[in-house]
Amino acid sequence: MFKFLKKNNDVKTAHELSGIVIKYSTERENDLELVVGKAGSLMVREDTFFIYSSVDTVFSTKLDDIKISFLMSGDGAIISGPDLTHGGVYRSVIVHFTYYRK
C-alpha cells in the first residue's frame, strides 16, 4: 500500500551513502560468503548507484530499483537490485564500511 514511501527512502539512503569508502564487498552464494571486491567506494551518478572496488565495478543498479538495508552492527549495508554490470541479474551485495558516522 505504501510502497512508494519505501522506494523514496531507499533512494534518499543511496544518496547519503554516496562517497562512503568501503573495506570490502561480499556476496552470498549457497552457504558461502565470497569477497567480490576490496578497497572501494559507493557512488551515485545520475540515476544509477555503483559499488566500486580498487579494480573494477562490482555492482550497479538504477535508483528506482535499489533496496538498501543496514547491518545490525551498523558497519555495513546490504544493497540489492538488478545488476546492470552483470546483465540485469538480481543480486544482493553486502558492503562493509571502513568508517561511517551518521
Image (cartoon, helix red, strand yellow):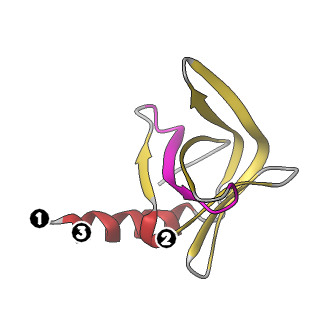
- Counting from the top left corner in percent of width and height, residue 70 is at 43, 43
In the picture shown, does residue 101 fall above or below 61? above
Q: Amino acid at mark 1?
A: Met
Quick check: is 79 in the magenta stretch? yes
Amino acid carrying label 3: it is Leu
Q: Residues within 10 Å of mark 1 (few under 14, many from 20)?
A: few
Figure quadrant of residue 72? top left
Q: Residues within 10 Å of mark 2 (few under 14, many from 20)?
A: many
Which mark is drawn over residue 1?
1
Q: Quadrant of the N terminus?
A: bottom left
Q: Element type at marker 2? A: helix
Mark toward the start of the polypeptide (2 vs 3): 3
- From the top left corner, tell me how far across and down residue 82 is, in percent: 53, 57
Determine the residue positioned at 55% across, 17% down.
31
Report the amino acid beneath label 2. Leu
Which span is picked out in magenta? 73-86
Q: Residue at x 83, y 54 (%)?
A: 56
The kind of secondary structure element at disc 3 is helix
Residue 10 vs 32, above or below: the answer is: below
Q: Which residue is denoted by mark 3 in the rendering?
A: 5
Query: Disc count in the image?
Result: 3
